[in-house]
Image (spheres, helix red, strand yellow):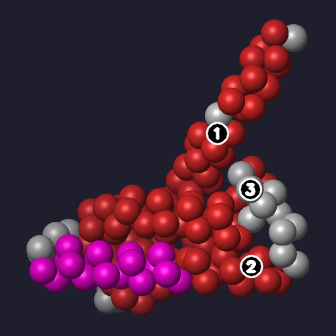
Amino acid sequence: MSRSIGKQKVHRQYPLLLKIMRYAFAGGIAAVTDWLIFGFGIFYLQLHYFPSACLAFIVATAVNYVLSVRYVFRSGRHPRRREILMVYMVSIVGLVLNLGILTMLIELASMNAMIAKILATGVVFSWNFTARHLWVFNR
């Protein structure tokens, strides 16, 4: 009983922190999905990093959406189709940021593509969470 009360107290006092932690879990699974597809594209299929990143983006965004509405955000602020469209619009901005960072790190800094992808993902995480929290889903 006291454990449940403690959880409720933490949830009331730090709701944004808990939401960020849940998003880190959902986003972490989506990031691993993104990295696996990206790596498969560049290393196995020998694709350029741009198409690999775009394919990975489409799948990882879908994974992130499903996990986010299940574990992080309250869906329903917008009709489902609009909500999904908004998630992809937010994610497209994230993809542009991601591709810009990849280009800088791979082309200009001669960094390994996979390491560059992981670093870019870390930067884009903040954008994705903030935009979804403030614009797409109920707060």
Looking at the image, is mark 3 or mark 2 nearer the viewer? 3
Q: Amino acid at mark 2?
A: Ile
Residue 61 lies, in percent from the top left, at 61, 73
User: Which residue reaches farthest left?
Assistant: 109
Q: Is residue 97 magenta?
A: yes
> Would you say the residues marked 3 and 1 are in contact, meaning their CB atoms lie under 8 Å apart?
no
State left or right for residue 104 relative to residue 84: left
Mark 3 — residue? 139
Whole-angstrom CA distance, mark 3 to mark 1, is 13 Å
Whole-angstrom CA distance, mark 1 to mark 2, is 23 Å
Q: In the displayed structure, would residue 9 be above or below residue 65?
A: above
Q: Quadrant of residue 83?
A: bottom right
Q: Amino acid at mark 3?
A: Arg
Where are the magenta residues, as a range?
92-108
Label 1 CA crowd tier, 10 Å (few <14, some 14–19, many 20+): some
Name the one closer to the observer, 50 or 45: 50
Disc with the residue nearer the chain's start (3 vs 2): 2
Q: Quadrant of the C terminus?
A: bottom right
Q: In the displayed structure, would residue 2 be above or below residue 59?
A: above
Mark 2 — residue? 84
State left or right for residue 120 relative to residue 30: left
Mark 1 — residue? 18
Disc with the residue nearer the chain's start (1 vs 2): 1
